[in-house]
Image: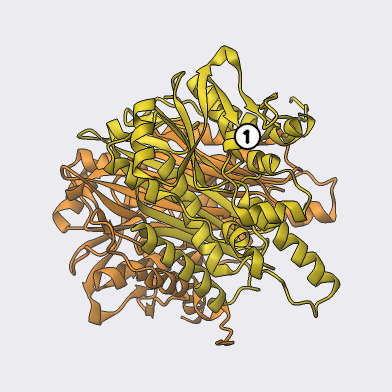
Chain colours: A yellow, B orange
Amino acid sequence: MDMTRTELSALGEFGLIDRLAAAVPLGRQASTRKGIGDDAAVLDLGNGRVQVVTTDLLLEGVHFDLTYCPLRHLGYKAVAVNVSDVAAMNALPTQITVSVGVSNRFSVEALDELYAGIALACEAYGIDLVGGDTSSSRQGLVLSVTALGIAAAAEVVYRSGAQPGEVVCVTGDLGAAYLGLQVLEQNKAEYMANPQMQPRLDDKDYVVGRQLRPEARMDIIHELRALGVRPTAMIDISDGLASEVLHLSRHSQVGFAIYEDTLPFDNQAAMVASDFRLVPATVMLSGGEDYELLLSLTQADFEKVRKAGLDLTAIGITRDLSEGNYLVTKAQEKVEITAQGWQAFRQG
Amino acid sequence: MDMTRTELSALGEFGLIDRLAAAVPLGRQASTRKGIGDDAAVLDLGNGRVQVVTTDLLLEGVHFDLTYCPLRHLGYKAVAVNVSDVAAMNALPTQITVSVGVSNRFSVEALDELYAGIALACEAYGIDLVGGDTSSSRQGLVLSVTALGIAAAAEVVYRSGAQPGEVVCVTGDLGAAYLGLQVLEQNKAEYMANPQMQPRLDDKDYVVGRQLRPEARMDIIHELRALGVRPTAMIDISDGLASEVLHLSRHSQVGFAIYEDTLPFDNQAAMVASDFRLVPATVMLSGGEDYELLLSLTQADFEKVRKAGLDLTAIGITRDLSEGNYLVTKAQEKVEITAQGWQAFRQG
C-alpha cells in the first residue's frame, strides 16, 4: 500500500480539478460534448440544441457567514452564481435543483427565508426549481445547487474560442463584491468587540449589495443575442479578473493585454478601497465574486456593442500567446499576470 | 416581524420537502414535466424524449462514517444511489456531476480513492462525469451528486401510475443493508473499546457489502425493457419498504396489501437479524438503504416477468384506496402500514 500523503494545498483547486477529471475519463455517452473544464458541461440534445449543466457547493464558514448574510440573500445568491455559469456559456437557464443540509439550530421559518430568496431568483431568471434533497447536517448549513440551461449548439461560447486581435471586455464593474466583504467583516469584528454598535453601512450599500446579492448578467446575454453578437470566448468572474484572464488564455491559447486605466471601478468602491488602503487594480484583478462576464469580441462585433450602449467596457486586446499575459499599468509599465494575481501585482 | 419558531422535526423530511416545493411554484419553463415529488424530475427534450434529473447530498457523520466506510466504496455508493433514482423512473443514466467539500485532513491520495470509486461506478453504469465543484470544508466530507438520465416520454414510470388489482413486486432482497450497518456499528464500538480487536466480518460479507456498496438495479430496468414490460408505478427503496409503499399509495391513490411470508430475506441477513434479536419483517419494512425497486405490474406483465425468471418477487397486490395499506402477517393478521413503519409494526 502506497502511504504517500500529498497535501491538497500542493495541487491548488485547479490542479485538483484537473487530476480528478483525469481519473474519470469521458467517452461513455455520445451526448457528452464538453465535460469538466469550462463554466458548464455541454450535452447534445439533438436537433442542433445543447444543454449546459453547472453546479456549485456553498458551505457555511467557507462561502458565507450567517452573522451578516441574511438567509433570503443567500438563497438568491446560491441560484444567481449558478445562473452566472449558464450565462458564461451564452445559454439560457431553464431549471435548477437545490439540496440543503441543515442542523436543528435552523427553524422552519429560517428555511422559509432561504427558499423565499430561491423563489425570487427563480422568478428573476425565469427558471423552475425541479428537485433537490434535504438532509440533517451536524456541520452548519450546506447548499448545493445544480443549474441546467439550453442553447442552440452554434450559440454556445466556450473559454477556448478567442483569437488574437480581438477586443477583451468585462460587463459591469469590478472589485466591489470583495470590498463589500471587507466592510461586512470589519463591521462583524466591531460588533463582536461592542455589541451595542450600530452598523454603519449607509454609504457602503453598493459594495455590500454586490457581496450579498450578486446578479447573473443574463441581461447582457439577452442584449448580445438581440444584436446578433456572439462572443468568441467567455467566462464569469468568480475568482477575480486575473484568474479568469489566465483561464481564457490557457483554453484559447492567446495572450491578453489588459489596460489598468480602462478597468471599470465604481465610485463607492473607490472610496471604500481608499478607506481600507487597498490598491484599486489589485482589488479588481484578484477580488473575486463579481459574477460579471469576461468576454472577447471581434472588432466588428465590439463596434455593434459599443454603439448599442451595453453595460460593458473594453479593457484590453488579445495577442499571440507568445506575447504573454500582462497588465499595462497607468504608468505604462507591463506587469505579468500570474496565477497568484494578488501577490504578482503587489510585486509589480 | 414574525418571531415564531417551528422546529424542523415538527414537519419531518417529507413535510419539509412539500413546504419548500410549494414556496417555489413551477410554471416558468414549458419543458418542466414533473418537479419535486418523484424519484427524479422529468424535463421534456422534444421529439418524444425526456430527461430525468435527480440529486443527493451525502454528509459525513449523517450518511456515512469514514471509520468503516472506505472512500472507494463511498465514491461508488454516491453514484449508485443517484443512478437508483434514475432507474426508478425507468430511465437510463447518462451523466453525473459530483461536488466535494473536504477539509485539509484529507490528502490528495484520499481523494484519489474517492474518485477511483466514482470512476468504477461510471464504468459500471456507462455514464460520464461531466462537472462538479471542489471546495474546502470546515465540516467534514460533503458530497453532492446530480444524475441525469434519458428515456422515451412513453417509457417513464412515475409513482402515480398504479391501479387496483396489480401485482406489487420488489427486486432483490430487503433489509440486508440495515443489518450490515448494525454489524459495522457493533464492530466500531468493540474496536473503540479494544483497539487490538480484529473485526470478524467473514460470515457477514453479504450484509456488510449491501451497506457499503449497493448497486442500482439497472440490470432489472434493461431486462424489463427487453421483455417489453413497463411497470405501472415504481420507486426505489431508500427509506424502507413501508415508507415507499406509502409514497406509491399516496401518489397512485391505491391501497397496498403486502404479505409478510413473501418478503425476500437473505439467509445471512436472517442469521444476523437473529444475532441482533431483530424481527425480520421489521428490518425489511423499515431498514432502508436497500436501493432495490418497488414496482407494480399488470397481471399479464407479471406473468411475463415470472416466466423470464427476473430477480424480482411478488409481495402483494394493489387494492382500492379505501381498503388502506396493510401487512398481512404470517399469522394472517392485518397490520396497518403507517408513516412510522418501524414503530407501527412493533405495536402490531
Q: Amino acid at mark 1?
A: Glu
Q: How many marks?
A: 1
Q: Chain of mark 1?
A: A
* Disc 1 secondary structure class: helix
Mark 1 neighbour density, 10 Å: few (under 14) some (14–19) many (20 or more)? many
- B160 or B185: which is nearer to us? B160
> Label 1 belongs to which residue?
A260
- In percent of width and height, residue B326 lies at 34, 76
- In percent of width and height, residue B58 lies at 57, 53
Q: Quadrant of residue B236?
A: bottom left
Residue at image point 34% right, 27% down: A300
User: Residue placed farthest to the left in the image?
Assistant: B300
Q: Quadrant of residue B174?
A: bottom left
Q: Quadrant of residue B178?
A: bottom right
For residue B287, above or below residue B157: below
Is residue B311 visible from the viewing direction of this image?
A: no
For residue A266, above or below residue B110: below
User: Residue placed farthest to the top in the image?
Assistant: A322
- B106 or A235: which is nearer to us? A235
For residue B233, above or below residue A33: below
- In percent of width and height, residue B61 lies at 67, 57
Residue at image point 59% right, 14% down: A323
Quarter of the image with the N terminus of chain B is bottom right
Residue at image point 44% right, 38% down: A40
Left or right, A144 with reference to B200: left
- In percent of width and height, residue A115 lies at 47, 68
Is residue A51 visible from the viewing direction of this image?
A: yes
